[in-house]
Structures are given as C-alpha cells and as structure tokens.
Image (spheres, grey):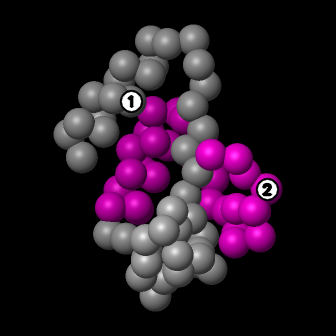
Amino acid sequence: MEIFFFKLCRLLGSLVIPIFVFDGQDRPSDKRGKKKNTQRIPSWVPPCKEIIEAFGFYSHQVRVQDHRGYLF
C-alpha cells in the first residue's frame, strides 16, 4: 500500500488525469489466461479506492459487459 501511495503522489504532479478501473461483482472467472476467484472482492480493493478518492482521482467499477468493449 505504501508504494501505491507514493505512485499516486507522483501522479499529482503530472499533467494526466488518471482513472482507475476495478472489476465489478460479475467479473469473469478467467482473465488473461489465469483463473480468478469470482466469489469475493480482493481485500486490497476497498483501501485502494479510499486512497484514490482522498487524492481526488477518479475510480470506476465496471460490470462484466463493459469489459468486452475495453482494449488493453
């Protein structure tokens, strides 16, 4: 969490506006060729969202249908 905090500090001084996108409740069980636990949200997600909001950055939680439209 400390590294994440300092990365956000660096983003404050940049000219970009970061948008953090998190998987929703109906996330796929297979992402990038790896099986994922879809039963619960990872424990690090809520604290990360709080820090992101404290910095004034945007975060968004997507539905599973939205994933198909994104290009990574």
Is 25 magenta? The answer is no
- Amino acid carrying label 2: it is Gly
Please rate how many residues cluster around mark 1, counting C-alpha atoms within 10 Å: few if below 14, some from 14 to 19, many from 20.
some
Q: In front: 59, or 38?
A: 38
Front tag of 1 and 2? 2
Residue on which the image places disc 2 = 69
Above or below — where is 67 with respect to 7? below
- Distance from the alpha carbon under mark 1 to that under mark 2: 27 Å
Please rate how many residues cluster around mark 2, counting C-alpha atoms within 10 Å: few if below 14, some from 14 to 19, many from 20.
few
Residue 27 screen position, x and y as percent: 59, 75
Q: Which mark is residue 8?
A: 1
Q: In front: 3, or 29?
A: 29
Residue 47, located in which quarter of the rendered image?
bottom left
| The magenta segment | 44-72
Is 64 magenta? The answer is yes
Above or below — where is 29 with respect to 63? below
Residue 33 screen position, x and y as percent: 48, 68
Residue at (59% x, 76% y) in the render: 28
Above or below — where is 6 with respect to 63? above
Q: Is residue 18 left or right of residue 12?
A: right
- Amino acid carrying label 1: it is Leu
Residue 53 screen position, x and y as percent: 50, 43
Residue 43, located in which quarter of the rendered image?
bottom left
Kind of element beneath mark 2: loop
Residue at (46% x, 87% y) in the render: 39
Residue 11, located in which quarter of the rendered image?
top left
* Farthest-out residue, left: 2
* Farthest-out residue, bottom: 39
Kind of element beneath mark 1: helix
Residue at (45% x, 33% y) in the render: 55
Name the N-terminal-most of marks 1 and 2: 1
